[in-house]
């Protein structure tokens, strides 16, 4: 066999191996949305928590959890909270947009605080509550009441809903913060109990200005920290709109104010030419100990877009792609892959 043939075989073999280990999107089976990703120090595994999708009017009522050791192969750990059943006594459905945080207690044990929104049949409004567990896969015990309602929004804010909650621990101060809102972005510091906020810290973080093609705020806030900066990401426009995408701003503190760079504010957009639609509502993962980042997000199944089998935005799938930064700390636009 001559050297040329040997080289071709080697290249072909290497390509095959790379393809075997390449990420395939979507990463979860079935229809799931609003993905929240977590790396657990207790188990040394990754987890994704999701809104169960595929129902008319976004009417799902369960939250599911998936686990992985390598971000490639995901195990379905089942339903970890049922909003219609006995799990959440104050709610009757519309289980939306969860988030979770792992907290190491003084005794060295771990607790998991899972925040979510659901419909309160008494107020007839979406409200936010929390469920707690000693394990990232449960069982979770939900509070018997909501912790964020319309009354908890910062002064002067009107409209929108108490949904799309995010939780964040500031690595600088060690303090915990909660963010929420549809049509507005509210933020506040959590008390040490992790299930109530400090009212005096409430602030309106809603980004000003922008358009549907740039950074006009809609929902889905997510906060993370890197190299002295606090990054705030959010979704623009409605989940079924062609303008639906992810933007970001930075701040010098966990409660703002936000600074938007118009030339570097767009993070993730759909690619209709490649049948990739509805790319938004994300969470962010930093690989432990490395400056290596991923964006976990949902997008609409191509068979359910504009005149397809259902209303656009109700059949979403979870995907993951690399997210990188330039030397100035700007998030580079993410190219969604298949």
Image (cartoon, rainbow, N blue to C red):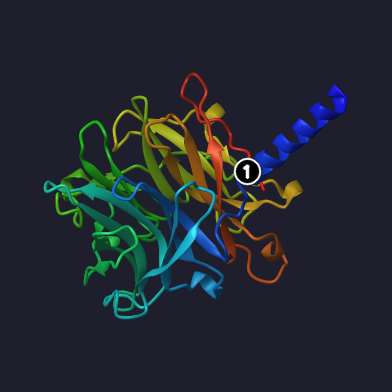
Q: Residue furthest front?
A: 1
Q: Residue drawn at (37%, 38%), measured in percent from left and top? A: 224
126 to the left or right of 241: left
Q: Give the percent coordinates (x, y) of residue 145.
A: 22, 70
Relative to 169, residue 86 above or below: below
Looking at the image, which is closer to me, 169 or 199? 169
Relative to 152, residue 125 above or below: below
In terms of secondary structure, where does tag 1 sit? Answer: loop
Q: Residue drawn at (48%, 48%), measured in percent from left and top? A: 282
Q: Give the percent coordinates (x, y) of residue 192.
A: 14, 49
Quarter of the image for residue 61 reads bottom left
Relative to 146, residue 170 above or below: above
12 to the left or right of 176: right
Q: Give the percent coordinates (x, y) of residue 130.
A: 27, 62
Q: Residue drawn at (42%, 37%), measured in percent from left and top? A: 287
**Residue identified by numbered label 1:** 22
């Amino acid at each position: 066999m001559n050297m040329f043939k040997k080289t071709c075989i080697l290249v072909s073999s290497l390509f095959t191996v790379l393809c075997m280990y390449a990420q395939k999107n979507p990463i979860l089976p079935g229809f799931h949305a609003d993905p929240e990703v977590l790396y657990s120090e207790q188990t040394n595994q990754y987890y994704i928590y999701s809104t169960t999708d595929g129902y008319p009017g976004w009417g799902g009522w369960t939250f599911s959890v998936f686990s992985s050791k390598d971000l490639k192969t995901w195990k379905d750990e089942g339903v970890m909270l049922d909003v219609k059943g006995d799990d959440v006594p104050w709610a009757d459905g519309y289980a939306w947009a969860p988030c979770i945080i792992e907290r190491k207690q003084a005794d060295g044990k771990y607790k998991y605080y899972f925040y979510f929104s659901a419909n309160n049949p008494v107020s007839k409004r979406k409200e936010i509550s929390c469920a707690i567990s000693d394990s990232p896969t449960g069982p979770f015990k939900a509070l018997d009441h909501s912790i964020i309602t319309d009354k908890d929004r910062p002064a002067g804010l009107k409209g929108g809903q108490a949904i799309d909650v995010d939780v964040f621990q500031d690595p600088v101060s060690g303090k915990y913060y909660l963010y929420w809102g549809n049509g507005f972005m509210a933020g506040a510091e959590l008390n040490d109990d992790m299930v109530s906020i400090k009212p005096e810290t409430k602030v309106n973080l809603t980004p000003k200005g922008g358009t549907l093609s740039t950074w006009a705020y809609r929902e889905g806030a997510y906060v993370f920290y890197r190299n002295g900066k606090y990054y705030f990401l959010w979704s623009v426009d409605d989940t079924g709109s062609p303008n639906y995408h992810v933007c970001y701003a930075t701040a010098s503190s966990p409660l703002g104010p936000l600074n938007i760079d118009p030339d570097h504010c767009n993070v993730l957009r759909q690619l209709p030419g490649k049948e990739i639609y509805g790319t938004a509502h994300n969470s962010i993962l930093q690989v432990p100990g490395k400056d290596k980042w991923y964006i976990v997000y949902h997008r609409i199944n191509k068979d359910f877009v504009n005149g397809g089998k259902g209303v656009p935005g109700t059949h979403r799938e979870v995907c993951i792609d690399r997210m990188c930064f330039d030397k100035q700390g700007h998030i580079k636009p993410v190219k969604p892959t298949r």
